[in-house]
Image (cartoon, rainbow, N blue to C red):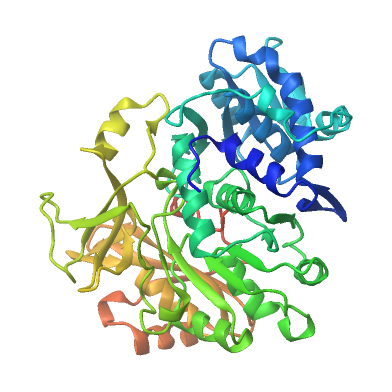
Amino acid sequence: MQYKRIIDLFINSIDKHPQRPALIADSQCWSYADLGRLVLSAAKKMEGLKQSKNNRIVIIGNNHPSYIVAYFAAQCLGISTVEISRNESLDNLLKIIEETGASYVVTDRKDLSTVLDSQTLMELFEDFFTTLDTKNTGIDFLTKIYSKASGSAEASIVYTSGTTGAAKGVILSHENFCFIASAVSDYLELNHEDRYALILPLCHTYGKSVLLSSFHAGAAVILLNEFNNIKNFLNKLSETKATILSAVPYHIHVLIKGGNLVDHDLSSLRAITSSANKLPHDTIDSMVKLWPGMKVYSMYGLTESTTRACYLPPELLHQKKNSCGKPLPGVLIKVVGEDGSDLSPHQRGNILIKGPNVMRGYFADQKMTNETLVDDWLKTGDVGYVDDEGFLYITGREKDIIKCAGERISALEIEEVLLEHEGVAEATVIGREDLLMGEILHAYVVLAEKQVKINEIRNHCFKGLSHNKIPFHYTFVDELPKTETGKVKKYLLSKN
């Protein structure tokens, strides 16, 4: 079913599956009816905010039941949620709170309480959750309070990961989220028996798509925050009998290279989805070997397309290894040249998206909105091509193309070759300014095996890359600076 408002899909699951598990966290389980009562209590607490000038609240924090309850309470009332990574600097958080005009902040950042303006109410997650009243009964209790906001209304302002610089506020509507929830639920064949493991941050649209597509299907969401301890994470994944896991390539690389997966019973897991970056060939081969019969979904999207634009059916994983799939039903994708003209199959150019998943625009930045949305087409900033059958292939980002000696070189291609070396756990490549060459290639590498030498990495590159794509510099690091969704913050490396 296609919903128009976010709260509608939640209420529908309360109605259909009141006693089914909705949320599992820290050995606690809340049914859909339980969660509905918590949301109603939170909505009553927030009801007065509907009269505020900008009708927005800010949620800042790690994945937590309070995050989910505050989110649905706001959506119930027709109040927009402003969502930002809790890892942003205090100054940036304060700036965003002020610019969006929010009058209420729900957070786990205790440092905000001492600096927020007296006109901005704030509650910490723990206080917010423990003061909720759950004595309300009945299945229709939420329908008496929820807003009749239109589907095109602003639902959230989601601040992007900021891999190339400062984060941008992306305005997304109820219809944007509802379209994605329905599409993802359909192609993953979600149902009320599923238990969807959530390790992705809720403040980003990939994590939000896990929450909403699960609730669209009446499935349970399992909050797992233990990924920094792989053994504990895998134990929880096994104990909770998770059936689906969504991840980014970083998570999958860590699991394959350091998770000792054979020591854990993951037989309940039927599907894994991957997005944010392309999975290298050897990683796909390792996944299939480790999880025979597992359905692996490779996907593509960005915050501006509400996280999803296309996916590759698992049965085509080997046949179309380099592809991220075909567009979702109702979504159009085209590839254009620098002059804006449509390109033929296999011609590489700039990728554009059009459909009900495309954002309304950037918050308080009409210039950037006009540059990015042209005739309802979203300019993604990604570079790639489509084949004769309409499958999309990503070859890099416009801002990730390195111009070396007059040639345009994709950092992604080099990174994939680096990751094929068994001694490399993670790798990224940037361009460094050079008076002679324009830019030279600099590789940053996290080792899986400490005894690996730079010459071994360089020789490996010579085997897999043409001579002009061999990195000039190699730096071994303990970790790469990343966003919460596992994307490398290359702009920080370029400052070193």
Is residue 492 visible in the rendered image? The answer is no
Q: Position of residue 317 (x, y in %)?
A: 43, 79
Residue found 64% across the figure and 49% down from its top: 215
Residue found 54% across the figure and 23% down from its top: 148
Relative depth, front residue between 181 and 403: 181
Horizontal placement of 320 versus 478: left or right? left
Horizontal placement of 329 versus 345: left or right? right
The image shows residue 297, relative to residue 196, as above or below, that is below
Residue found 51% across the figure and 86% down from its top: 285
Relative depth, front residue between 18 and 254: 18
Q: Position of residue 141 (x, y in %)?
A: 74, 28
Residue found 49% across the figure and 78% down from its top: 419
Q: Position of residue 335 (x, y in %)?
A: 21, 58
Is residue 46 visible in the rendered image? The answer is yes
Residue 319 placement: quadrant: bottom left
The image shows residue 15, relative to residue 269, as above or below, that is above
